[in-house]
């Protein structure tokens, strides 16, 4: 799933939540399903903002380069 698709899905979930659906479900970047309800609307808003920030960094060319995990002793 692309970043743009995840943003669209999160925006749809937020819209559904704000227009009266009691619970919405989003698939996050790891493929895990996360359920949001009115009680944790702020968590969904924060998730959406983080996706948009990631997209902005990607477009600006400042996205962090992720390489293999290395441990330094």
Image (cartoon, grey):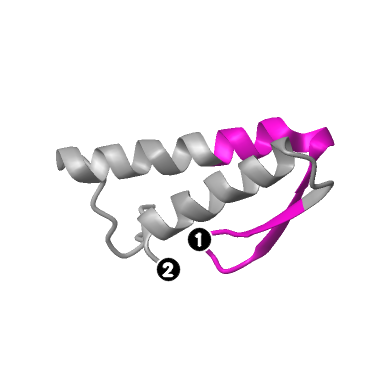
Apparent side of residue 52 relative to residue 41 in the rendered image (left or right): left
* Highlighted range, magenta: 24-47
60 and 15: which one is in front?
Answer: 15
Q: Which secondary structure lies at badge 1?
A: loop
Figure check: 40 above or below 32: above
**Residue at image coords 27%, 61%:** 67
Marking on residue 29:
1
**Is 72 part of what is drawn in magenta?**
no
Mark 2 neighbour density, 10 Å: few (under 14) some (14–19) many (20 or more): few
> Which residue is at the front of the view, 18 or 71?
18
Q: Where residue 50 sits: x, y (%)?
A: 47, 38
Give the image location of residue 42, x and y in percent: 68, 30
Q: Quadrant of residue 5?
A: bottom left
Mark 1 burial class by Cα count in 10 Å: few <14, some 14-19, many 20+? few
Q: Along the horizontal axis of the image, is 62 left or right of 14? A: left
Residue farthest along the front direction in this orientation: 19
| Residue 54 image offset from top left, x and y in percent | 35, 42
Q: As drawn, is 67 to the left or to the right of 31?
A: left
Measured from the top left, where is residue 1 in percent x and y?
Answer: 42, 68
Asked whether residue 71 is in view, the answer is: no
Q: Are marks 1 and 2 in contact (CB under 8 Å)?
A: yes
Q: 68 or 42, which is in the foreground?
A: 42
User: Which one is in front in this view, the residue at disc 1 or the one at disc 2?
Assistant: 2
Q: Is residue 65 above or below residue 54?
A: below
Question: Does label 1 or label 2 sit earlier along the sequence?
Answer: 2
Task: Give the distance between the C-alpha atoms of the residues marked 1 and 2, in whole angstroms.
Answer: 8 Å
- Above or below, 65 against 33 in this view is above
Which residue extends farthest left? 61
For the residue labelled by badge 2, is the local secondary structure a helix, a strand or a loop?
loop
- What residue sits right under mark 2 in the picture? 1
Question: Which residue is located at x 56 percent, y 41 percent?
Answer: 47
């Amino acid at each position: 799933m692309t970043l743009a698709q995840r943003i669209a899905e999160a925006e749809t979930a937020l819209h559904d939540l704000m227009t009266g659906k009691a619970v919405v479900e989003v698939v996050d970047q790891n493929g895990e399903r996360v359920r949001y309800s009115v009680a944790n609307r702020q968590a969904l808003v924060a998730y959406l903002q983080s996706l948009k920030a990631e997209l902005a960094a990607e477009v600006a060319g400042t996205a962090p380069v992720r390489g293999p995990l290395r441990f330094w002793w």
